Image (cartoon, helix red, strand yellow):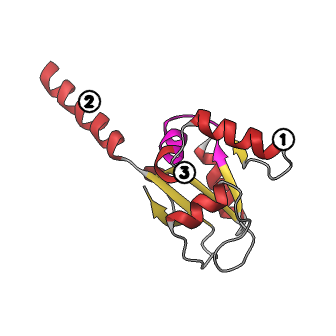
Amino acid sequence: MKIVISAILLCLTAMQAWAGVAVIVHPANGDAIDKKAIENIYLGKTKSFPGGSQAVPVNIESGPIRETFDSNVLGKSSSQLKSYWSQKVFTGKGTPPKEVASAEEVLGLVSSNPNIIGYIDSSQVNGSVKVVAEF
């Protein structure tokens, strides 16, 4: 019995490790978005989607999904991002994306506003949002 329980726990852990990060937008947002465009939006280098509509990025405050997004999409660690945004704020050249506490908040914001772009664990995606990229 212990072996069966251990095997089930191992499978669940492995499935969670395979879950990726889904970058999401409102379903009405028709813009095609590549990794570079997502990076530019989240680093404040552009304030619009490729199609020209306003883009408002939202970050999850902390956790494994945030760390995965920062390293795989933005190519920076959390300390590098803090330094990056400190410099931008100090020089008046930008403000960091809004931070929310949970993926549920990201889903709520994205599903209610076509200008917001966010990311969540891909296992949490539902029909209220559109996935534009997975990492």
Which of the two labelled residues, at mark 3 and mark 1, occupies the earlier sequence position?
3
Residue 64 in the image: state x and y as whole percent.
49, 36
For label 2, count other residues whose C-alpha is less than 10 Å away and answer few (under 14), some (14-19) or many (20+): few
Q: Nearer the viewer, mark 2 or mark 1?
A: 1
Q: CA distance from mark 3 to mark 1?
A: 21 Å
Indicate left or right for 45 with 69 as reference: right
Which of the two labelled residues, at mark 2 and mark 1, occupies the earlier sequence position?
2
Q: Is residue 78 above or below residue 28?
A: above
Q: Which mark is residue 74?
A: 3
Q: Which mark is residue 77?
A: none
Q: Is residue 26 above or below residue 98?
A: below
Residue in view at x 42 percent, y 55 percent: 135
Q: CA distance from mark 2 to mark 1?
A: 47 Å
The answer to whether residue 33 is seen in the rendering is yes
> Residue 27 occupies which quadrant of the picture?
bottom right
> Residue 42 occupies which quadrant of the picture?
bottom right
Chain part drawn in magenta: 59-70
| Residue type of the residue flagged with mark 1 | Phe
Residue in view at x 53 percent, y 59 percent: 23
Residue 60 in the image: state x and y as whole percent.
62, 43
Which of the two labelled residues, at mark 2 and mark 3, occupies the earlier sequence position?
2
Q: Which residue is mark 2?
A: 9
Q: Nearer the viewer, mark 2 or mark 3?
A: 3
Q: Is residue 115 above or below residue 108?
A: below
Q: Which mark is residue 90?
A: 1
Which element is circle 2 on? Answer: helix
Which element is circle 1 on? Answer: helix
Residue situated in front as seen by the camera: 75 or 16: 75
The answer to whether residue 129 is seen in the rendering is no
Q: CA distance from mark 2 to mark 3?
A: 32 Å
Residue in view at x 84 percent, y 41 percent: 90
Indicate left or right for 124 with 26 as reference: left
